[in-house]
């Protein structure tokens, strides 16, 4: 028993997961028309890799998915999984290199899923694989892509209607020769790729041949140029050594002269800076002192002015007090003299103006206190109704006169201090005048230093020009070393060990440089420039050519091996095919006689020649026909008992059906597949032939499992398990099963 289970989920009319177990050699599937029993057969086709939507009664992948019903929603995908027994490890699978892949599984499961967008997925034991892998796996157990193991209603006589070439392919598939065909196709693809690779390698060698010849000539020139390089090296040693000595000497001389000038310039700058720093410092100091004295003078004069204002106010107050002393006071109204009122207002306004122009708040408070005293005093003098006290007024007058004397004394002191400050200011001004005269003398000296500084700067610029020339000559020297290094390599630095006497002569150096240039031009003409690269390229190119030649040998060996393999496979197919035809004929004759009660039937190999007609006149060319390969096909010959009918097209429908069934069963007996699916192949049989058909089923079931879709009672009676398919109330197919052994035991 090879086939174990079949799981259907969302495929066509099966909306939910449905499992069929194949525990009997013959399993029969029955049910009314339209119940979905043929969908089981199509599910098997689907999971085994069928690509024709027409054979599964659909136009696209979407047609294979459950479309839904009034009670069930439509599905988004359909999946079918089939399980095989692999305890004997009969299933084989190989990779692109022909190496077998380990399939150490007791159960082999193959799944196929289709989605609403038409995408298909193939899964082998849980891992996603290609359709090609599924086909190769099934071919190892005689389940080929021709579908000879699945015979559906209306296709029973397909092998009779097929062309002789297609009929041969179907028989090769049934004989298990398809695996060799796959290997031949793989070998043909490899042969084509190898042939193309060989052509590419040949073209590469052909393209490289002129370049190799060119490089070879360049290498010969390079070898000849080596002699000139020896002369060039000798010239370079002398020229570069003398040039390096000259440059070093010039650099040293200019460096000493430049340092001398820079030191003198530094000294002059220091002298100029000292003069510029001394005079402004002394001048700034005197000016600062003069400003301080002038500020102090302003402060003293401000104080003096303040004292003068106070003295004026005191004098006014004394005068007012004296007049007040002589003036009688009335009891109700107070009479104030106009001059006194004006003095009072004047004094108040002066203090207020002084407070307005004050910047510091602390200086404003004393002024406001003075204003308050003036107002209080005014109120005391004119705000009381009592009679004036001559003694009290006399005391106030004396106090004011005392304050007046103190202020006069302070004013005298300030005048003395003011005169001292004026004397100091005059002395500072004289000192500043003297310093200005001294500064004029320093400017004359500084001018002399600046003239010398300008002379030194001009000399320094001249040295810079010489340094630029030396720098340019040094760059030329380094470039010459680089160019020489490109020609003669690291030997260019051997000039450092060259010795000579005396000093280098610039004229001789120029003549030497011209000789070097002439040799370099000759080397360029000889192709010596980049000679090492050319030599390296020549070696790499020749090595590449040798590699390509070796690769061509390997490819040619591979092509011969592939051709031998293809020849061996074709011979093996031819031998096994002819041997298989003989075995099929034995079974075909036996089954045909059983079905028809006698007669003969056989298969014969025929050779068909293909002729190509001339496109212009429609005639063939015999010389060209010799190179056209011949094709082998299969012809079916039958002879019915008691009839003279020997041509297939002369058979009736029932006779064709019996003949095709006999042939298909005969094919399956020679190299039996694990299972056969028969979808109502007995529909056209009468009762007598149905019994013969049932006998053949039992005979076939000894070597292959049979899944039979039928309406025939005789066929049903030969099954061990009967699956009934029906449409449920929800509009989806449902499955019922009956095991006849158990049913018989229960019936007894």
Image: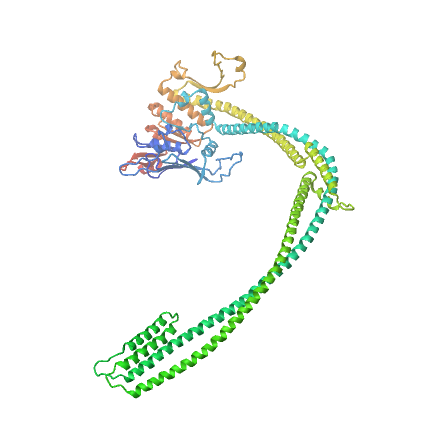
Nearer to me, 526 or 575: 526
Residue 141 appears at what percent x and percent y?
Answer: 47, 32
Q: Is residue 300 at least partly visible in the picture? A: yes
Q: Quadrant of residue 717?
A: top left
Q: Residue at x 47, y 75 (%)?
A: 418
Q: Quadrant of residue 569?
A: top right
Above or below 228: residue 317:
below
Nearer to me, 696 or 339: 339
Residue 177 appears at what percent x and percent y?
Answer: 49, 27
Q: Quadrant of residue 56?
A: top left
Q: Residue furthest left?
A: 332
Q: Residue furthest bottom?
A: 391
Above or below 540: residue 417:
below
The quadrant of the picture occupied by the C terminus is top left
Residue 35 appears at what percent x and percent y?
Answer: 30, 32
Nearer to me, 160 or 444: 444
The number of discs equals 0
Q: Residue at x 39, y 76 (%)?
A: 308
The quadrant of the picture occupied by the N terminus is top left
Above or below 465: residue 56:
above
Nearer to me, 617 or 529: 529
Above or below 399: residue 343:
above
Q: Is residue 20 at least partly visible in the picture? A: no
Q: Is residue 137 left or right of residue 267?
A: left
Q: How is the image coloured?
A: rainbow
Residue 3 appears at what percent x and percent y?
Answer: 42, 35
């Amino acid at each position: 028993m090879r086939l174990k289970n079949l799981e259907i989920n969302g495929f066509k009319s099966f909306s939910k997961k449905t499992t069929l177990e194949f525990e009997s050699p013959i399993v029969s599937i029955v049910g009314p028309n339209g119940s979905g029993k043929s969908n089981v057969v199509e599910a098997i086709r689907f999971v085994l890799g069928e690509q024709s939507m027409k054979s599964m009664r659909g136009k696209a992948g979407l047609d294979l998915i459950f479309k839904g019903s009034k009670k069930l929603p439509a599905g988004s995908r359909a999946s079918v999984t089939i399980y095989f027994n692999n305890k004997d490890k009969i299933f084989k699978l190989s990779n692109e290199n022909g190496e077998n892949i380990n399939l150490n599984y007791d159960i082999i499961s193959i799944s196929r899923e289709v989605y609403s967008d038409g995408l298909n997925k193939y899964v082998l034991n849980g891992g996603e694989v290609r359709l090609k892998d599924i086909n190769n796996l099934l071919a190892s157990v005689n389940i080929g892509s021709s579908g000879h193991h699945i015979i559906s209603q209306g296709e029973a006589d397909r092998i009779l209607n097929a062309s002789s070439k297609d009929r041969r392919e179907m028989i090769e598939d049934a004989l298990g020769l398809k695996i060799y065909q796959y290997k031949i196709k793989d070998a043909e693809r490899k042969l084509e790729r190898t042939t193309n690779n060989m052509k590419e390698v040949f073209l590469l060698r052909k393209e490289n041949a002129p370049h190799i010849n060119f490089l070879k000539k360049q290498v010969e020139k390079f070898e000849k140029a080596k002699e000139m390089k020896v002369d060039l090296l000798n010239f370079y040693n002398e020229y570069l050594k003398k040039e390096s000595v000259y440059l070093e000497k010039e650099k040293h001389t200019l460096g000493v002269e430049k340092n001398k000038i820079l030191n003198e310039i530094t000294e002059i700058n220091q002298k100029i800076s000292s003069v510029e720093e001394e005079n402004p410092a002394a001048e700034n100091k005197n000016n600062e002192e003069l400003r301080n004295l002038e500020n102090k003078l302003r402060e003293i004069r401000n104080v003096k002015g303040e004292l003068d204002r106070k003295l004026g106010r005191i004098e006014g107050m004394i005068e007012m007090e004296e007049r007040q002393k002589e003036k009688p006071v009335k009891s109700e109204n107070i009479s104030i003299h106009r001059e006194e009122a004006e003095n009072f207002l004047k004094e108040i306004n002066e203090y207020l103006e002084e407070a307005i122009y004050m910047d510091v708040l602390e200086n404003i408070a004393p002024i406001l206190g003075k204003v308050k005293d003036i107002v209080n005093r005014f109120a005391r003098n004119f705000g009381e109704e009592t009679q004036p006290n001559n003694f009290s007024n006399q005391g106030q007058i004396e106090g004011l006169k005392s304050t007046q004397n103190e202020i006069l004394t302070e004013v005298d002191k300030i005048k003395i201090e003011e005169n001292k400050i004026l004397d100091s200011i005059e002395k500072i001004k004289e000192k500043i005048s003297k310093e200005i005269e001294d500064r004029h003398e320093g400017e004359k000296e500084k001018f002399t230093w600046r003239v010398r500084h300008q002379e030194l700067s001009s000399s320094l610029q001249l040295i810079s020009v010489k340094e630029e020339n030396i720098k340019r000559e040094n760059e030329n020297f380094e470039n010459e070393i680089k160019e020489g290094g490109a020609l003669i390599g690291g030997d260019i630095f051997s000039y450092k060990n060259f010795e000579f006497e005396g000093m280098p002569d610039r004229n001789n150096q120029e003549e030497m440089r011209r000789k070097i240039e002439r040799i370099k031009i000759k080397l360029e003409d000889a192709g010596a420039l980049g000679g090492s690269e050319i030599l390296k390229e020549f070696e790499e190119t020749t090595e590449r050519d040798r590699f390509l030649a070796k690769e061509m040998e390997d490819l040619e060996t591979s092509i011969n091996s592939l051709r031998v393999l293809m020849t061996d496979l074709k011979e093996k197919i031819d031998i096994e095919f002819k041997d298989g035809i003989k075995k099929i004929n034995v079974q075909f004759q036996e089954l045909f006689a059983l079905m028809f009660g006698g007669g003969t039937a056989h298969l014969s190999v025929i050779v068909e020649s293909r002729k190509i007609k001339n496109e212009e006149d429609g005639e063939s060319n015999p010389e060209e026909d010799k190179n056209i390969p011949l094709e082998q096909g299969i012809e079916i010959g039958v002879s019915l008992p008691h009839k003279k009918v020997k041509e297939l097209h002369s058979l009736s429908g029932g006779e064709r059906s019996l003949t095709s069934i006999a042939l298909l069963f005969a094919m399956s007996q020679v190299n039996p597949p694990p299972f056969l699916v028969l979808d109502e192949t007995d529909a056209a049989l009468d009762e007598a032939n149905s019994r013969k058909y049932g006998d053949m089923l039992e005979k076939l079931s000894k070597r292959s499992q049979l899944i039979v879709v039928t309406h025939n009672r005789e066929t049903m009676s030969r099954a061990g398990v009967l699956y009934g398919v029906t449409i449920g109330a929800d509009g989806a197919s449902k499955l019922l099963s009956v095991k006849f052994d158990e049913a018989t035991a229960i019936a007894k």
